[in-house]
Amino acid sequence: MTTPPAAQSSRPHPLHALRASAFAIGALLLLAGIGVLVHQPLLIPPVAASAALVHGAPGLPISQPRNVVGGQLLAALIGYGTLALTGSTAWGAAIAAGLALGAMMLCHLSHSPAVASAVVVVLQAPHAWPFLPLLVLSTVLLVAIGLLPGRFGGHPVRYPLSW
């Protein structure tokens, strides 16, 4: 019995890569500006990874709005719960990351960049207010900006595929 040859993934057209990069940069600059204004730059790493998925792989299930917003919020909440139990330690961050992953899987909110939000919460211990509302605002804006490429310029995958 032979196995069929692996499907070769096609490279995106350079204009699609440029468009994805431009929209991701625009979204992240907006979010970085908001973070600087409210003194919360901690969101940049996990939200940057989310932007990479929304703009670079908009057809993946983990890139869909429900997963982006819900996964980030769930992971941050798990981070706060873990922080309360373990304190701000590397051990606590590792536990929060694993718990966030499992919870997202069980809730059908898988969004791998959100694991970084749980880690940020445990290691940096930001005050829940304004961190959580800013996280929600950031992910909602990221999703809203993710809607634009498919409406302007014909991105090959319409975003979102599901809510």
Image: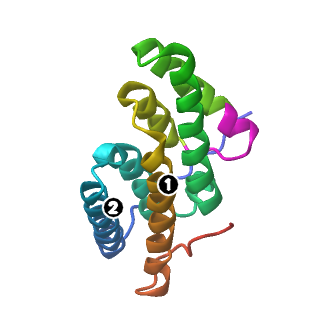
Rendering quarter of residue 90 = top left
Residue lying furthest bottom = 152
Residue 163: image location, x then y, percent: 68, 66
Q: Residue at x 45, y 64 (%)?
A: 142
Q: Is residue 114 magenta?
A: no
- Which residues fall within the magenta stretch? 103-111
Residue 99: image location, x then y, percent: 62, 26
Relative to residue 141, is residue 82 drawn left or right?
A: right
Residue 105: image location, x then y, percent: 69, 37
Relative to residue 162, is residue 38 drawn left or right?
A: left
Give the secondary structure at mark 1: helix
Give the secondary structure at mark 2: helix
| Amino acid type, mark 1 | Pro
* Residue 31: mark: 2
| Amino acid type, mark 2 | Leu
Which residue position is annotated with label 1?
A: 133
Task: Tell me: residue 91, above or below residue 98.
Answer: above
* Residue 12: mark: none
Badge 1 or badge 2: first in the primary sequence: 2
Q: Residue at x 68, y 34 (%)?
A: 103
The quadrant in which the N terminus is found is top right
Rendering quarter of residue 31 = bottom left
Whether residue 6 is visible to the viewer of this picture, yes or no, is no
Residue depth check, mark 1 versus mark 2: number of the one nearer the observer: 1
Task: Tell me: residue 91, above or below residue 45.
Answer: above
